[in-house]
Structure formats: C-alpha cells, structure tokens
Image: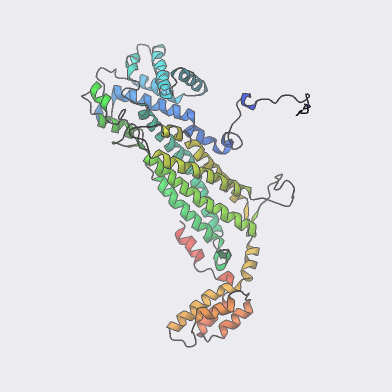
Amino acid sequence: MDVPETTLNTSVPARVSLAEVTPPIALGPLDGRYRSAVAPLVDHLSEAALNRERLLVEVEWLITLCNGVDGVAGPVVPGAPRLTDEEISYLRAIPATFGADEIAELKEIERTTVHDVKAVEYFIKRRIAAAPEQIPGTDLPAASELVHFACTSEDINNLSYALMVAGGVRGVWLPAATALVDQIADMAREHKAVPMLSRTHGQPATPTTMGKELAVLAHRLRRQLRRIEGAEFLGKLNGATGTFGAHTVAVPGADWPAVSRAFVEGLGLTWNPLTTQIESHDWQAEVYADIARFNRILHNLATDVWTYISMGFFTQIPVAGATGSSTMPHKVNPIRFENAEANLEISCSLLDTLAATLVTSRLQRDLTDSTTQRNIGPAFGHGLLAIDNVSRGLKALAVNAVLMAEDLDENWEVLGEPVQSAMRAASVAGVPGMDNPYERLKDLTRGQRVNAERMREFVTSLGLPDDVSARLTELTPAAYTGLAEQLVDEYLG
C-alpha cells in the first residue's frame, strides 16, 4: 500500500532543548515557580547543605581526636598534635565558608571518587595541606590522616542529616508554622462573638461562633507544634556495624563510647548507643509523622475555609490587578486554600513514605535510606509552601457577619434542641405535661421550616415555669451560641 508523502513545514525551526539552557531550568516547582516561598529551606535541606554539614562533622571529629572533648582528655589518638585556637578557627572556616566555588570544587572531586563522603574527606585534606600557607609553623598536616578516622560514611551522614533536619525544623518550619497558628488564633479572638450556624453532616445544626470554630483548629495545631518542639534528633558515631571495632583495634586505650557520646551531644544531638551501621532513623519517622499530622489538620482548615468562602461567610478582599478567572471577570477564586490543599497532600505523601521507609534496613545496612533521605527537602518544601499560602489567604478574608445573621434567622428550627432539653429538665423537676419532649420537637421541626413566631407559640403552649418560658421565648438562633465566646477566652491561650 502506498503511503502518501508527508509534507513538512520546513520553515519551523527545531525546538531549543530546555535541558541545555543556562542557567539550568528547574525541573520542579519548588525550585522554580515557588522558589521565594521555600528558599529558606535551601540553607538546611539541600544537597549543598548536606555537604556543608558533612564538612562540619568531619572537622569537629578531627578537632575532637586531637584535643578531646568535655570529660575526655585529649588527644584521643596518642601522638595527635594538639590544635591551637588559630588552627581550630582555620578548620572551622572550611564549612563556614562553603559557597559556590567550594561546591563546584567538591563536585569535581566527587567525579573522580564517585563517592560523596570520600570527596568530602579529600576536600578537607586539601585545606589541611594548604594550612602552612596561612598558619606559619603549623603542625596541622600531621593530623591529616585523622580526617574520617575509624568512620563509616554513615557516621558522617547520620549526624549531618540530624543537623540538617534540626536546623530546618527549628530554624524555618517551626517559626513559619507557629506564626500561622498565632495568626489563626488572632482571628479566633477577633471573631469569637460572631454567631454562625453550624453544619453537621452538611445540615443546619446548633449555632456556634466563627471565632470558636477557628479556635478549635488553632488548638489542634498548637498541640502538634508542642510535640514537634519536643522532638529528639538522634545521632551515632560507632563505626561500620556499630561496635566501635576499628576504634578499639586502632586505639584500645580510649573510652570510645564516652568520646562518641560527648561528641554527638556536643553537636546538639541525642546520642544513640545501639545501632547497626546506620542510626535507625526512628526519630526521623516520629518527626515526619507529627509534621504530617499538622499538615492534615491544616488541610482540614483549608477545606473548611474554602467551604465558608463558597457559602459567603467569608468574603475575599480583591487584590488590585489580580485575575480570578480567565473568562469570568466577577470571580475571586480561593486559590490560596486550593494551592495549600494540594501541597499539603504532596508533603504528607512524601513524609509518610520517608517515615515508612526509613525505619527499615536489611540486616546491618542497605541503601534505601540514602535515596529516600534526599527527598526530605521537597517534603518540607511543599508543606512550607502550603503554610505560606494559607497565611496569605487568611489575610485576604473578611467575615460577612450580615449574611451569617441572615442564615441564622432562616433556621429557627435549630432551637428545637434547647427547647426539648429544657422540657427534659422540667420533667425531672416534676413539672407536668413534659412527656415525650424529643418526639414533640421532632414533629414540629423535622423536614419543615419554623419561623420565630411559630417557635415562640410552641414554647408558650408548653406550660413551662415562667422563668424557663421567658428564657426560651427570648432565645434566638443568633443568641444560641452557649459558651463559645468564653471557651475562646479561657482555653485558646
């Protein structure tokens, strides 16, 4: 069968390969569209941050081996030179000055070693070899072979990741999350007395206040923050299978568990004495589970606020020049909360995977954790982006108290609950004629609308004590908010 010749438009040029554009184009949105919202995490959870922390751990271990640690007299390794303050400052400048040129140099070394931690070792040894140029008469090169002494890569990596995650949580995520929860709490206080019809199962229900409902979410989120604030970040330094094997053979006279403990705690971490080649990562699973739970509660807030916007209880303050819909000019879409929903779901998926994967390692070591941990940054990044979006979305909201009042006034049947409850109390007190209160209110209200006049007629016909009857006839849906305002004042904090 003859195939017709295809006519090509030769005037259309070949497309430029975006993979070859300089500077490189981001593959994902966190390093592209949303970079400004998540940029603070780069200093803690990026590949460069990992290498900087590796440099720090290696340098501090070298200083420890030469000079000892609190409670353990140095040198730990006999014959190691005692470092001067100038030499220690020189070494600590290696991670402190780790910037663009150093990142490129380390990457070049890794191309040869094909091993990232070994590249870090060689990078430091280069600096040590160059020390005499800056510190005349230094004996620092004599300590060169103590870089990475008795360490497996995981000794360096587990401590580096612990420092990274601790820094990311305490330095970036917690401040942002705490500020958002404080913002929600401030809104709760501001609107604590604004009555609102509840919807349980989507149906009109006992009234509340907008502030009390926001206070519930702030209270839930704060509980998770307290758990995260109290998180432990564990670390180990005990060799290839956690036995201090190389340590004790090379230097049998040292109290290696004491040295290890003092070193790890000196980094601000909690020492883990019993491990395989890897620190077991259980602490990571705990932190990620708590942050994922915070995310899910925040997701609940985002969907509730989105629903209140759709009901008109919240109005969105238009931003000058912003477009809501590309075709419907009247719309102001709740994009901040929708964006937050999606990013919280992505963050939770990654955090759940991290928590599930990291707690398992075959026998004494496998590498599943190595690849998995490289996704800690995106897991936090999507969560931080969601926090930013919710915060910005909440700032652009105004409460429509007038519409909420109209909604309450159209649902007098919700007063069936307090009326039948008052009848029950009266019945217990011996007031006659209070039989079957629930059933009588069900007949009055279920499936039909009841206005103020009809409800008050019913109440006055019951024969309740005068004070009870007066209290019920004066009650309105807007006034039936119980202790909502008081609960915000007393328990939100």
Q: Is residue 294 visible?
A: yes
**Residue under the point 38% across and 45% down:** 230
According to the image, what is the colour scheme of the structure? rainbow
Q: Is residue 22 visible?
A: no
Q: Quadrant of the N terminus?
A: top right
Image coordinates of residue 363 in percent, x first then y, are 33, 34
Q: Quadrant of residue 61?
A: top left
Between 391 and 203, the residue placed more toward the observer is 203
**Residue under the point 63% across and 67% down:** 407
The answer to whether residue 353 is left or right of residue 455 is left
Image coordinates of residue 82 in percent, x first then y, are 29, 19
Q: Quadrant of the C terminus?
A: bottom left
Q: Is residue 38 above or below residue 409?
A: above
The answer to whether residue 33 is left or right of residue 97 is right
**Residue under the point 57% across and 77% down:** 474
Q: Residue furthest bottom?
A: 432
Q: Residue furthest left?
A: 253
Q: Is residue 442 above or below residue 184?
A: below
Between 292 and 211, the residue placed more toward the observer is 292
Q: Residue furthest front?
A: 1
Q: Is residue 52 above or below residue 183?
A: above
Image coordinates of residue 432 in percent, x first then y, are 47, 88
Q: Quadrant of residue 152?
A: top left
Image coordinates of residue 87 in percent, x first then y, are 36, 19
Q: How many marks?
A: 0
Between 19 and 39, the residue placed more toward the observer is 19
